[in-house]
Image (cartoon, rainbow, N blue to C red):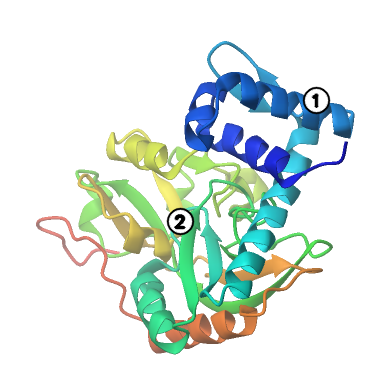
Amino acid sequence: MAVELRHLRCLVAIVDAGTLTDAAAELDVSQAAVSRTLAALEAELGTRLLRRTARQVSVTPAGERVLGRARRVLAAVDDLVADAAGHATRLRIGYAWSAMGRHTVAFQRRWAVLHPDTELQLVRTNSATAGLAEGACDLAVLRVLPDARRFASALVGSERRLCALAADDPWARRRSLRLAEVGERTLVIDRRTGTTTPDLWPADARPAVEHTSDVDDWLTVIAAGRCVGVTAEGTAAQYQRPGVVYRPIRDAEPIAVRLAWWRDDPPATAAAAVALLAELYREGRGGLPIAAAPGQDAGA
């Protein structure tokens, strides 16, 4: 027996659905069929891909490697079928938190006008490569440097660093903050996908840290007033939440924004996407609307 597309589709469906039962419903087959297909794939590859319990599945290290390639293979096959049938091609752009920030809508609209034959899909994946390593996208918006051995990337713009804090925090009345004073607070960070680490501060002045694993959790902790966060201004554009405000950190280095792709498999539309997003960042320099708190003063 050889590995077949149905095996790969089964694996992806199980991981995305979270259980064999839900994957069976997604694939319109019985749960027993899903279980047999997965077992056949694991037997063919000679390794365990998933750990199964009564309620959920988790991916093994070997499964992570296979899953990323499976997604890429399936996406390539889908594109091949669409191309052969004369249908529109597709470009999937992944992101972990804030997509293209305030340029997201403009990018979507301009892309539709400039490239009507290429369907654009934005895919949120909470991983360090925004879904690129996992095969969930063709290009990824990154605000950290990717592994240059595996991925190529192009700089398209930069964003200010902002401090996110509770709307009733005394600092919410100020127009800007300094990095050193932010370091005196407890900082909430996402170790997997966040752009901020304690290394942003000197070794003898690093903040206390709490961790989250998702932007929604990050915002919830900040709104409660227990911690503050440091993030790219794209987050402020995408996540305006009641109870949270953003203030610029005036002495912090800006965050570079990149588009990245597999070094050995660049999508044909990569150059066009890079050019359009770089143009939007050039056009949009300065003037980010940041939620103001009632009674904001001019303090710095």
Disc 2 secondary structure class: strand
Can residue 132 be spotted in the picture?
A: yes
Residue matched to label 1:
48
Judged left or right of residue 172, residue 50 is: right
Q: Is residue 189 above or below residue 59?
A: below
Kind of residue sitting beneath label 1:
Arg
Residue matched to label 2:
231
- Please state the horizontal and vertical placement of residue 158, each as a whole percent of the image: 51, 75
Q: How crowded is mark 1: few (under 14 residues within 10 Å), some or many (20 or more)?
A: some
- Please state the horizontal and vertical placement of residue 130, each as a whole percent of the image: 58, 54
The residue under the point 64% across, 42% down is 9
Structural distance between the alpha carbons of marks 2 and 1: 38 Å
**Which residue is the extreme one toward the top?**
54
Judged left or right of residue 26, residue 33 is: right
The residue under the point 54% across, 46% down is 126
The residue under the point 54% across, 70% down is 90
Q: In this view, does 185 lie above or below 279?
A: above
- Please state the horizontal and vertical placement of residue 88, each as a whole percent of the image: 51, 75
Disc 1 secondary structure class: loop
**Which residue is the extreme one toward the left?**
295
Kind of residue sitting beneath label 2:
Thr
Give the quadrant of residue 156: bottom right
Q: How crowded is mark 2: few (under 14 residues within 10 Å), some or many (20 or more)?
A: many
Residue in front for this viewpoint, 220 or 102: 102
Q: Earlier in the sequence, mark 2 or mark 1?
A: 1
- Please state the horizontal and vertical placement of residue 51, each as a whole percent of the image: 70, 20
Asked whether the beta carbons under mark 2 and mark 1 sit within 8 Å of each other, the answer is: no
Quadrant of the drawing holding the C terminus: bottom left
Q: Which one is in front in this view, the residue at disc 2 or the one at disc 1?
A: 1
Quadrant of the drawing holding the N terminus: top right
